Image (cartoon, rainbow, N blue to C red):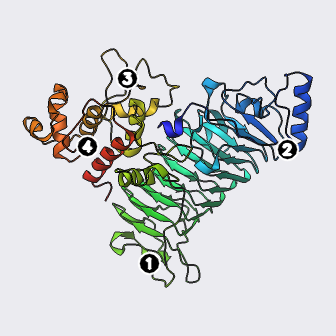
Amino acid sequence: MASFLSQSIVGVLVLSMGGQVLPAVLSPTQEYAQAFDKLKQAGGIIFVSPFGADTNNGSQGQPLRTITAALKRNLPAGTVIQLVEGTYSAESGESFPLRLPKGVILRGNTATNGAGIVIAGGGKFLSPTFADQNIAILVEDQARVEGVTVTNSNRRGYAVWLESAQGATIINSSFINNVHDGVFMTGTTKADIVGNIFRGNGANGMSAVGSSSGVITGNTFDNTGFGIVISQRSTVEVSNNRIINNRGGIIVNNLATPTLRNNLIANSTESGLTILPDRAGNPVVDMGTPDKPGRNVFENNRVSDITNATRSPLIAVGNQIDAKKVVGQVELVASDVPITPPTTPSANQGLADVRGHWAEKQITALAQRNIIKGFNDGSFRPEEPVTRAQFAAILESAFPQMGTVRPAQAFVDVPESFWGHRAIAQAFAKGFMSGYPSGEFKPGDQIPRVQVLVSLVSGMKLSGGDPAKLKDTFKDASEIPSYALPAIATATQNRLVVNHPDPNQLAPNRPATRAEVAAMVYQLLVQRGLIK
């Protein structure tokens, strides 16, 4: 979506270097070297913008172009690499993987979880514990990743990898549409994973393996394969997370011994919590004790709230669990301590311009599920048109678990480097959208309302409705293209059509607005029982 995949720059942040402002203009000669020496001594800020130049000095007035160039400068601990809005990829000059050295901070905008500040790509990394991998960022001891969006669409692509990193922090960022995991902790890693959004990742939101430890708290794992996988001998504490709308909430196996406190685990298509046996023993999950109740909330998980496949009983004290949705040896113990859902990053932060809007309910519902997002200025801009690429991204977020019905197709105007390449490929393969006879997809074209409805009907294989009755329903039925008549009749029958302010005016060929697309997608999710 354009809201968090924008490739335009909003502006350069005004920050100082340890209280010391660098000159606005320096030539890349002796003055450059002197300025950079001062910055290193101060452990200050290096500015990076995809519209900068790597021959610049890294000051506010002369930002570097790439994170790669900043990392080549032998940065001392405490240095901040400050990113401004834009996309940082191989096309903009990045060399992956990006290796974040000890104590260095990679920072975007923590207030928006990195919306619009996108690191896209990955490169080969030989892990001492997991051999060849493809990762975007390698985080070392005491380094921090703050307020960025990371996506790695490469085969087995991971966003952030922590290999025995001590004291690392990943905070207020977004890990979106990575082929494998958003965050991977291995070896002896001890890290804090705090306040992040994980969505649309192919395998898992994140994994904690090896003898990793630390805290995973205040995150949102939404539509992201399995939310969290904890295995081998990991001892992580998982608390105050929203783990929703995933294939499975939490998987625990091998000899892991995690602690679970005050998490919401809901709407899994399989199990909320799955505990798997190991030949060497069984994992042990701390789900609460009499003095420290678990306070985890399990809701609407399709197969089970908890599946304990081991021979060791799980004792869960003070949790909200449906006893009818428990498989295996599980002892549920009540507690008098009140249970409240956790507070985690919301996709609905600051959407001031939807208050009182006719589609406020629908926009809010989708934003809360991270299907749509607002812009960095706190707006949603409900009356702006939607492009075909943006609509494909919405479909990918709204229906991640739909299977493919045909092979993906390469479009001549959608290179692999295009931000919406994966979403467009998925929209085609799942049967939602098609291209043009010319071999184009036309990703930048505004999508008409009729195409939105045809897409939703086609992708979900809906049926019903009588095209002959459309003239009695819509006063502009004559404007509906002939190819779309059956689909519009089906959409009408299934209550997907949203017309405002005149319910009898379809306006089929007018570009769909962000509010209208949100409302139509919402209607389909309700119709399919995916939103109650």
Other-residue count near label 2 (Cα within 10 Å), few / some / many at <14 / 14–19 / ≥20: some
- Look at mark 2 in the image and give the residue it sits on: 43
Which mark is first along the chain, 4 or 3? Answer: 3
The residue lying toward the viewer, choosing from 3 and 322, is: 3
Which mark is first along the chain, 2 or 1? Answer: 2
Amino acid under label 3? Phe
Secondary structure beneath label 1: strand
Q: Point out residue 408 in the picture as x, y percentages from the top left corner.
A: 37, 28
The residue lying toward the viewer, choosing from 130 and 167, is: 167
| Rendered residue at 58%/40% (across/down) | 150
Amino acid under label 4? Asn
Which mark is first along the chain, 3 or 2? Answer: 2
- Look at mark 1 in the image and give the residue it sits on: 331
Which mark is first along the chain, 2 or 4? Answer: 2
Secondary structure beneath label 3: loop
| Rendered residue at 45%/69% (across/down) | 297
Other-residue count near label 3 (Cα within 10 Å), few / some / many at <14 / 14–19 / ≥20: many
